[in-house]
Amino acid sequence: MATQPALVAVFAAVDELLAALDALKTGSFTVHTVYSPVPLHEIGDVLDLPRSPVRFFTLTGGILGILAGMGLTVYTCLQWKFIVSGKPVIPWIPAVVVGFEFCILIAILFNLIGLLTQTRLPKLRRPEHYDPRFSRDRFGLLVLYPEGERQTLSTMLRECGAEEVHEAAA
């Protein structure tokens, strides 16, 4: 399987990176990965990233947790009856408390599973094109380009303020 050609650009400032991302929206280039030493919401805004599906994992876990907690309480009350002076066989207050606790517990577990699956963690090795400066003080951009467009992309990235641009395998 042949890999699509890609360039890695190194930027010193956020504004230069955002300018490059904005310029790449108009061309036939694909932004594969953006590296940043700090979290930046502006990157997501420029790239128009979709909302994370992890929230659905959490919702599913919460609903299953409520059902499991309520089910456990009902099962326990029916299996081992504790009838006291006219109180109901299935008291609702303990069912709500246990249901809430299970909701939180299972929602957290599903959230963690969703996070790990959606981010493809753990990553046991770094990509070959990764530069350690991306974790310290520089911003990186990995861009895929069609055959014959290397010079155009390289020029565009340098005009946006890239300190260096070099070939990488994506």
Image (cartoon, helix red, strand yellow):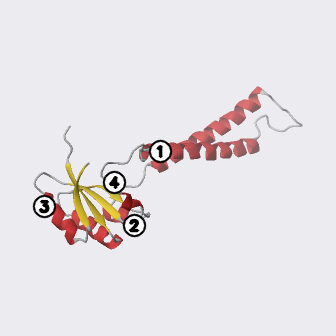
The residue at the point 75 percent across, 29 percent down is: 78
Provide the residue designation for mark 3.
Answer: 151
Q: Find the distance from the CA under tag 3 to the CA under tag 1.
A: 37 Å
| Amino acid carrying mark 3 in the image | Gln
> Looking at the image, is mark 4 or mark 1 earlier in the sequence?
1
- Does the residue at mark 3 contact the one at mark 1 (Cβ under 8 Å)? no
Q: Residue furthest right?
A: 85
Provide the residue designation for mark 2.
Answer: 137
> Looking at the image, is mark 2 or mark 4 earlier in the sequence?
4
> Looking at the image, is mark 2 or mark 3 earlier in the sequence?
2
Image spot of residue 152 (x, y percent): 13, 62
Indicate left or right for 120 with 87 as reference: left
The residue at the point 38 percent across, 58 percent down is: 132
Q: Find the distance from the CA under tag 3 to the CA under tag 4.
A: 22 Å
Provide the residue designation for mark 4.
Answer: 130
Label 3 Cα crowd, 10 Å radius (few <14 / some 14-19 / many 20+): few
- The numbered mark at residue 116 is 1
* Quadrant in which residue 158 is drawn: bottom left
